Every structure is written in structure tokens, then in C-alpha cells.
Image: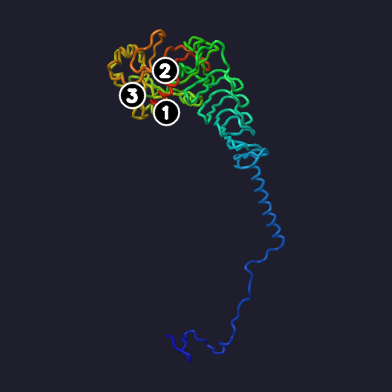
Amino acid sequence: MAISDNNGIPVNNNNAPDNPANDNKVPEFDSPQPFFNKPPKGRMNVVFLLICLAVAITAVAYFVLYETGYIHVTRTLENGAIFSGYWKMGEPFGEGVLITTNGELIEGVWEDGKLNKGVVVAKEFTYMGELKDYLPEGYGSCHYKSGVRYYGFWKDGVKSGLGKLQTPKGEVAFGKWENGELLPVKGQAYKTGEKVYGMDVSNHQKTIDWENLALYADSTGNVTGELTSSPYLQPVMFAFIKSTEGTDWVAHTFQRNFEEARRCGIPRGAYHFLRLSDIDGQIKNFIDHTVLEPGDLPPVLDMELDNREMAKHADLACEYAHKWLDAMEKHYGVKPMLYTYDSYYNSYLKGKGFDDYDFFIARYNPETMPKVPHLEIWQFTEKGNSGGIDAKVDLDIFMGDYQAFEKFVEEKGIK
């Protein structure tokens, strides 16, 4: 219990000093000690050397990574251009972006300090393709701000070689270019775009050189498919590419052909070959392996079963065709096309609910046009010749000029 002293300050008896004489004794404390002992001079030298060595190793490592292409840098080059990307042995390496002194943006993958292909974005155009010293060289496409598009070969930054030019007004120029100008062909009595030719391809054509596709025509621009060379040329303006067949077959050339057609500025479409097997599996097979993008042509059902099989199972074939066409329209948002022979239409399809579809008809008699409703494309030969293809190829013609074809793609192609 606490008691008060004479001054009324509480004290605790239990803690009262035993000897009053101790009240005036100054408590003893230990002498102040440093927080750490000062290391010997030799040890400080070792620590300093270790720090210097670590800094040197870090600097060397950074330099090695920098020079071998593992560090992203942004630097100004001697000519004033700015490069952002990777650096190796004093040169650009790998993915990077270059901004020139006149404001052009050049993007691509550098190899040994050179950019052999890439994208050039300038004030008046965007170019994508092969390059030499940052100028178009080889094959490439150029989209101008005016709406003009060119797909073809270049030399020293100007059009040179086989190429196709399209304008927003629906005009087309195709042939051999030199110093940026289309070379005239003596005796040519047609304008490109008056007739619109295309082709459909599959594994049978093997590896196609899409950059050099050209159809051989006569002086009036007519393509029969029989010519193997000619100074009169027509461009391939569209291509249908086989994707699938039945429930599980997939064309191994489809993906490459589909990508190459787009790169070369050729409107593309995909088709499925119908079989009398599980139709749900066939629908899944096509959708799983066929990605259609805006600007692509509508999907096509290839209905050309063996004549004896078709005669025996016509009703089942028509039922399967309707299911496939309905599923494609629901999935891709556009009405598909139907490919068949005009004789098949008249014998098996007429009156079976297909007359609302656009038809892509195979008929190899050049004297008479197929007679079916909504004829959009006529396959006029299965033994055609084309530059860029070593095998025979199916050749087609659209029922209209180039302006009508562009309208068809806009209205009925993939949105």
C-alpha cells in the first residue's frame, strides 16, 4: 500500500532504500561503447575492391547483353533517325522500329543490321513487303492515302515487274511495270476489269506462287485456259480455296493459300466438299478449320457427288446440303453459295428449295452459259493454265465487271 511522505508524494515502502546513506550515491554506468567496431584498414580495402569488381562485372554483363541483342534500347543514329529495339554487335537486331528524319515509321525484324522486309508508314502511303535500304524492293503491297492500292514487284522504290493497281473508282491496271509506269502491250484491245477472272484451288495445285499469278489471254482479253503463255495478261481477281471434305478431312494447303491470297490482294473464299456422312460432323469440320474475315467471299458448298451416288441418294444429299447451308449462314452471318454442275441442278436440285441461293456453276462448254437462277460465277474449265502454278487449275469468271464484283463482295461477303 502506498503512503505519503511529508510532502504528500506517494512512495512505496517496499522499494524504500535499506540504507538512507545510499540516497546520495551516484549510480554507476558502463562507459559508452561504439555501435560497431572499426574494421582494420586492410578489410576496408577488400570491401572496396569487391564493390568495384561487382560494378565492373555488372557493366561488362550489360555491355555483353547490349551488344548481343538481349537489351531493348532507344538511340539516335548518325543520320538522325531514331531506332527503338534490340542491338547486336553495333547494329540493329531483331524486332524494332525506326523513325526517319522525315517522319516515316519503319517496322520489322532486322537481320545483320538490315531490314529485308517490313512495314513503312509514310504521310501518303503504307507499304508492306520486301525492302532494300528501307526502299521497296521485291514483292510488296502499297496502300495510298488516295485509296489506290498496288500489289506487285518493286525496284529501287518504284513499281517494276508484274503488278496490279486498283483505284477507288473501280479501275484496274495489270501487267508488267517499269520505272513506275505500266508498259503498253501492242495490239491489246481490252481494259483490265471488263472481265473478272478467278480460280478455285486445292491440294492438287501443290505450292502456288501467289505473287506471280497471271492468266493468259488473247488480244481481246478473253481467257480460255488453253494458252500457256501470252503477252496479254489478266489478273486473278478472286480465289476459292478448298478447306474441308466430309467429317474429318482438312486440306493441308488451305492455311497457306488462304493467307497468301490476302497478302497478294486477292479476295478469297473457302469451300467444303459434301459427303453423305454425318452432316453435323461436316458442319463442325468446316467451322473448326475455316476462319473467315471481313472482306472474304461467302462460304461455298461443293455439291458434286458421283452421279450414280447422287441419283440414288438425291433426297438425302439435298437434306444434308440444306443443313450445312443453314448452319453456315447462322455462324458466318452471310448466305453461302452453292457450287454444282448445271446438269445436277436441273436433275436433282431444281424445285428443292435452293433457288434463293447464289450459284457457282461448273460447265465446260464455252458456247452456252449455264442456265440456273442467281448465277454469279461460272467455272468454264478444269484444265486451265496460270503463271505461278505448275499444275492444271479450275478457272472461273464472274458474271459482271470489276465494279459489279466489288459490289458483290461488299454486299454478300463477310461483314
Q: Quadrant of residue 47?
A: bottom right
Q: x%, y% of residue 148?
A: 51, 27
Residue 325's mark?
Answer: 3
Q: Is residue 385 left or right of residue 317?
A: right
Q: Please, is residue 122 above or below residue 179 in the view? A: below
10 Å crowding of disc 1: few (<14), some (14-19), many (20+): some
Please state which of residues 95 and 198 is positioned toward the viewer in this rendering: 198
Residue type at mark 1: give it.
Answer: Leu
Q: Quadrant of residue 238?
A: top left
Residue 160: percent from left, percent from top = 59, 21
Tell me if label 2 and label 1 are in contact, CB under 8 Å.
no
Label annotation for residue 400: 2
Judge whether 54 appears above or below 162 on screen: below
Residue with the mark numbered 1: 292
Task: Mark 2 or mark 1: name the one nearer the start of the chain.
Answer: 1
Neighbour tally class for label 2: few under 14, some 14-19, many 20 plus, Cα within 10 Å: some
